[in-house]
Amino acid sequence: MKSLASWMVSSRQRVYWIFLVLISTLSLALWYNHVTKLDVTVMANTGLRGYIRITSGKKDQFLDIHCKECALVSSSGQMLKAGKGKEIDKLDCVIRMNNAPTVGYEHDVGSRTTLRVVSHTSVPLLLKNETYYFRQSEGTVYVIWGPERNMRQDGKGQIFNVLLRTAKKYPQVKLYAVTREKIQYCDGLFQNETGKNRMQSGAFLSTGFFTMVLAMDMCDSIQVYGMISNDYCSQANHTAVPYHYYEKGRMDECRMYRVHERARRGGHRFITEKAIYGRWAAHKKMEFKHPSWTEREKVS
Ligand SMILES: *[C@@H]1O[C@H](CO)[C@@H](O)[C@H](O)[C@H]1NC(C)=O
Ligand SMILES: *[C@@H]1O[C@H](CO)[C@@H](O)[C@H](O)[C@H]1NC(C)=O
Ligand SMILES: *[C@@H]1O[C@H](CO)[C@@H](O)[C@H](O)[C@H]1NC(C)=O
């Protein structure tokens, strides 16, 4: 039988051991927490910081995508009868704009869609057919751009709110927003290239402009399909095509471009933007197909 004294010693030892185990468990837990937190920060720092995930889940997830060869498929009527579908589908990534359809146009524009750049004004068009865009095409990445008033994240941005609801309803769909900083950066690009302040000159950047910038961020090389050069419309022999290949045009592409180029307020400077792409193409791995651009058009 143990004496009282020896019982007290072993009891004290027991407390000591329990204490030791507790301490090491606690420090292990703290260390683990620290490491996983570190992991999250490291992960949040990868990706393209100009594009942020729209999600009710983890904050600060940036678009993490990189492609060797991209097809950037324009929505222009130039794509009608282009017959470029197979060529487009063979490239690593296929980038499209807004709700431009592939179904029924596969032969001309291809059938794969890696990513869509979508204007805030086209978000309702996606939602009108949400089963198709967010269920059947759930592998597609959506990058939405829009002005602060529609895309602010404090509950007052109407389009952002709609997108957040969509993200909750389809948590597997990858929805991203172009950040305010990136949009300001694009305004800066426009100003540097044209010498004009984007806002003061009454211009809105087009979805094509944001798409071109994103393509340069994510692709090693870009094949642009269906985009005309800045002087195409002034050539006497140019072909008149609808503004969009999927809309029976009331106005042909060149007329639409001229109207926008001249608009005092709220116009897209499609022709000016094409001249900018031409200058970029002289330094970047960028080819224009259907119609193909001459070397002169690429440095205009
Ligand atoms: C949704 O889009 C798909 C693919 O473009 C099209 O085939 C379908 O008719 C559309 N559905 C509706 C309801 O608009
Ligand atoms: C525009 O040009 C200025 C002056 O050269 C430069 O500091 C700035 O980074 C440029 N902005 C963009 C978006 O390229
Ligand atoms: C128009 O004519 C020019 C010069 O002859 C030629 O290079 C160009 O390919 C023609 N464009 C079209 C759309 O036929």
Image (cartoon, rainbow, N blue to C red):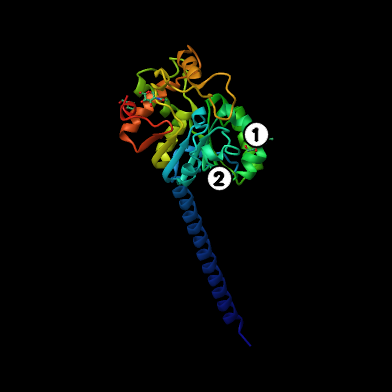
Residue at image coords 49%, 13%? 265
Q: Is the CB of mark 1 within 8 Å of ligand 1?
A: no
Q: Amino acid at mark 1?
A: Leu
Q: Nearer the viewer, residue 212 or 43?
A: 212
| Residue 59 coordinates in the image, percent (x, y) | 53, 42
Q: Which mark is residue 100?
A: none
Q: Is residue 257 visible?
A: yes
Give the quadrant of the N terminus: bottom right
Q: Nearer the viewer, residue 16 or 116?
A: 116
SS at circle 2: loop
Residue 104 lies left or right of residue 195; in this view the side is right
| Residue 159 coordinates in the image, percent (x, y) | 60, 29
Q: Amino acid at mark 2?
A: Lys
Residue 98 lies left or right of residue 91; in this view the side is right
SS at circle 1: helix
Residue at image coords 37%, 24%? 275
Q: Nearer the viewer, residue 23 or 75?
A: 75
Residue at image coords 47%, 29%? 208
Q: Is residue 35 above or below residue 196?
A: below
Q: Which mark is residue 58?
A: 2
Q: Which residue is mark 1?
A: 127
| Residue 40 coordinates in the image, percent (x, y) | 49, 50
For residue 218, what is the image quadrant? top left
